[in-house]
Image (cartoon, grey):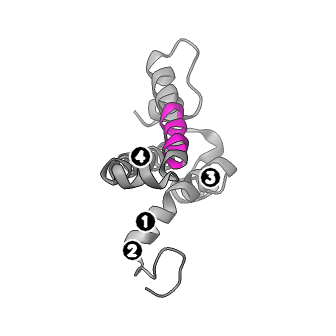
Amino acid sequence: MRRRIYEILNNPRPDDRLGRFINIALLLLIASNVAASILETDAELAHEAPAFFEWFEWISIVVFSIEYLLRLWSCTAAPRFAGAVRGRARMAATPMALVDLMAIAPFYAELLLPSRGRCGGPL
Protein backbone atom coordinates (compact mmCIF):
# COMPACT_ATOMS: atom_id res chain seq x y z
CA MET A 1 0.00 0.00 0.00
CA ARG A 2 2.84 2.40 0.89
CA ARG A 3 4.54 1.83 -2.48
CA ARG A 4 1.26 2.37 -4.35
CA ILE A 5 0.56 5.65 -2.56
CA TYR A 6 4.12 6.79 -3.23
CA GLU A 7 3.74 5.89 -6.91
CA ILE A 8 0.39 7.69 -7.23
CA LEU A 9 1.62 10.89 -5.59
CA ASN A 10 5.11 11.06 -7.07
CA ASN A 11 5.41 9.20 -10.34
CA PRO A 12 2.24 7.56 -11.65
CA ARG A 13 2.56 5.38 -14.71
CA PRO A 14 1.02 6.82 -17.90
CA ASP A 15 -1.71 4.15 -17.85
CA ASP A 16 -2.51 4.73 -14.15
CA ARG A 17 -6.00 6.25 -14.14
CA LEU A 18 -6.13 6.81 -10.39
CA GLY A 19 -2.70 8.44 -10.36
CA ARG A 20 -3.62 10.68 -13.27
CA PHE A 21 -6.96 11.59 -11.67
CA ILE A 22 -5.34 12.52 -8.32
CA ASN A 23 -2.61 14.57 -9.98
CA ILE A 24 -5.12 16.43 -12.15
CA ALA A 25 -7.37 17.01 -9.13
CA LEU A 26 -4.44 18.43 -7.13
CA LEU A 27 -3.43 20.69 -10.01
CA LEU A 28 -7.02 21.92 -10.34
CA LEU A 29 -7.16 22.59 -6.60
CA ILE A 30 -3.92 24.58 -6.81
CA ALA A 31 -5.26 26.60 -9.74
CA SER A 32 -8.56 27.14 -7.90
CA ASN A 33 -6.66 28.44 -4.88
CA VAL A 34 -4.80 30.92 -7.04
CA ALA A 35 -8.11 32.06 -8.55
CA ALA A 36 -9.74 32.32 -5.11
CA SER A 37 -6.82 34.37 -3.80
CA ILE A 38 -7.16 36.76 -6.71
CA LEU A 39 -10.95 37.01 -6.36
CA GLU A 40 -10.69 37.58 -2.62
CA THR A 41 -8.71 40.78 -3.23
CA ASP A 42 -11.90 42.32 -4.59
CA ALA A 43 -13.32 43.96 -1.45
CA GLU A 44 -16.94 43.72 -2.62
CA LEU A 45 -16.67 40.04 -3.52
CA ALA A 46 -14.80 39.24 -0.30
CA HIS A 47 -17.54 41.03 1.66
CA GLU A 48 -20.34 39.20 -0.17
CA ALA A 49 -18.90 35.69 0.17
CA PRO A 50 -16.61 35.51 3.22
CA ALA A 51 -17.98 32.11 4.24
CA PHE A 52 -17.17 30.66 0.82
CA PHE A 53 -13.56 31.83 0.94
CA GLU A 54 -13.10 30.53 4.48
CA TRP A 55 -14.74 27.19 3.65
CA PHE A 56 -12.64 26.83 0.50
CA GLU A 57 -9.46 27.56 2.47
CA TRP A 58 -10.30 24.93 5.10
CA ILE A 59 -11.10 22.26 2.49
CA SER A 60 -7.93 23.06 0.56
CA ILE A 61 -5.73 22.94 3.66
CA VAL A 62 -7.21 19.59 4.66
CA VAL A 63 -6.56 18.13 1.19
CA PHE A 64 -3.03 19.56 0.94
CA SER A 65 -2.21 18.44 4.48
CA ILE A 66 -3.36 14.89 3.76
CA GLU A 67 -1.32 14.90 0.56
CA TYR A 68 1.79 16.14 2.42
CA LEU A 69 1.41 13.59 5.21
CA LEU A 70 0.83 10.76 2.71
CA ARG A 71 3.96 11.82 0.82
CA LEU A 72 5.96 11.77 4.07
CA TRP A 73 4.51 8.42 5.12
CA SER A 74 4.95 6.71 1.76
CA CYS A 75 8.35 8.09 0.74
CA THR A 76 10.20 5.25 2.49
CA ALA A 77 8.97 2.96 -0.30
CA ALA A 78 11.54 4.62 -2.57
CA PRO A 79 15.16 3.50 -2.16
CA ARG A 80 16.46 7.09 -2.04
CA PHE A 81 14.29 7.75 1.02
CA ALA A 82 14.97 4.48 2.83
CA GLY A 83 14.85 4.65 6.61
CA ALA A 84 11.89 5.83 8.63
CA VAL A 85 13.48 8.91 10.16
CA ARG A 86 16.36 9.78 7.84
CA GLY A 87 14.42 8.95 4.68
CA ARG A 88 11.50 11.13 5.70
CA ALA A 89 13.86 13.92 6.73
CA ARG A 90 15.54 13.72 3.30
CA MET A 91 12.17 13.83 1.59
CA ALA A 92 10.96 16.73 3.75
CA ALA A 93 14.08 18.68 2.73
CA THR A 94 13.42 18.36 -1.01
CA PRO A 95 12.42 21.57 -2.77
CA MET A 96 8.90 20.34 -3.60
CA ALA A 97 8.25 19.17 -0.04
CA LEU A 98 9.47 22.52 1.31
CA VAL A 99 7.11 24.34 -1.07
CA ASP A 100 4.24 22.12 0.10
CA LEU A 101 5.11 22.78 3.73
CA MET A 102 5.34 26.54 3.16
CA ALA A 103 1.90 26.44 1.56
CA ILE A 104 0.20 24.85 4.58
CA ALA A 105 2.35 26.05 7.51
CA PRO A 106 0.92 29.60 7.72
CA PHE A 107 -2.58 28.21 8.21
CA TYR A 108 -1.47 26.08 11.16
CA ALA A 109 0.73 28.85 12.56
CA GLU A 110 -2.29 31.16 12.57
CA LEU A 111 -4.33 28.51 14.40
CA LEU A 112 -1.66 27.79 17.00
CA LEU A 113 -0.12 31.21 17.66
CA PRO A 114 -1.94 34.08 19.30
CA SER A 115 -3.17 36.58 16.74
CA ARG A 116 -1.59 40.01 16.65
CA GLY A 117 -3.81 41.44 13.94
CA ARG A 118 -3.59 41.10 10.17
CA CYS A 119 -0.09 42.46 9.59
CA GLY A 120 1.53 41.46 12.85
CA GLY A 121 0.73 44.77 14.50
CA PRO A 122 -1.22 45.30 17.71
CA LEU A 123 -4.90 44.56 17.71
Question: Could you say which disc has been placed on residue 112 in the image?
Answer: 2
What's the CA distance linking mark 3 and mark 2?
A: 20 Å
Asked if the residue at tag 2 contacts the one at tag 3, i.e. Cβ–Cβ closer than 8 Å, the answer is no
- Residue 92 lies left or right of residue 18; in this view the side is right
Per the image, label 1 sits on a secondary structure element best described as: helix
Question: Could you say which disc has been placed on residue 60 in the image?
Answer: 4
Spot the residue most to the right: 95
Per the image, label 2 sits on a secondary structure element best described as: helix
Q: Amino acid at mark 1?
A: Tyr
Q: For the point 50% across and 45% down, which residue is it? A: 39
Q: For the point 58% across and 15% down, which residue is it? A: 14
Q: Which residue is mark 3?
A: 99
What's the CA distance linking mark 3 and mark 1?
A: 15 Å
Asked if the residue at tag 1 contacts the one at tag 2, i.e. Cβ–Cβ closer than 8 Å, the answer is yes
Q: For the point 50% across and 64% down, which residue is it? A: 106
Q: Which residue is mark 1?
A: 108
Image quarter hosting the N terminus: top left
How many residues crowd mark 1 within 10 Å: few (<14), some (14–19), many (20+)?
few
